[in-house]
Image (spheres, helix red, strand yellow):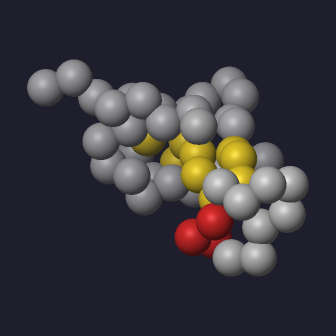
Amino acid sequence: MEVLCEVANCVYNLEGEKCGASEISIISEVGKTASSQQETDCQTFEPQEN
């Protein structure tokens, strides 16, 4: 499955805005059930070093 990501400064962001992480962890900011995208968060994100 292809996962798209537009966060340009993530170490896992590959050409074409594709996530190259072997595992992806998404959490809800509001408990077990989210009702919007704003209530979720990608825990796999790691910033690139400059």
Q: Is residue 9 visible?
A: yes
* Residue 20 at x, y percent in the picture: 56, 33
Q: Nearer the viewer, residue 1 or 12?
A: 12
**Furthest-right residue in view?**
32
Q: Is residue 16 visible?
A: no
* Residue 11 at x, y percent in the picture: 39, 30
Q: Nearer the viewer, residue 50 or 39?
A: 39
Is 10 left, or right, of 39 in this rendering?
left
Q: In the rendered view of the protein, which quadrant contains the C terminus?
A: top left
**Rendered residue at 51%/54% (across/down):** 5
**Furthest-front residue in view?**
30
**Rendered residue at 39%/52% (across/down):** 7
**Rendered residue at 53%/48% (across/down):** 18
46 vs 26: above or below: above
Is 40 left, or right, of 48 in this rendering?
right
Res 14 → quadrant = top left
**Furthest-bottom residue in view?**
36
Q: Nearer the viewer, residue 33 or 18?
A: 33
* Residue 43 at x, y percent in the picture: 59, 37
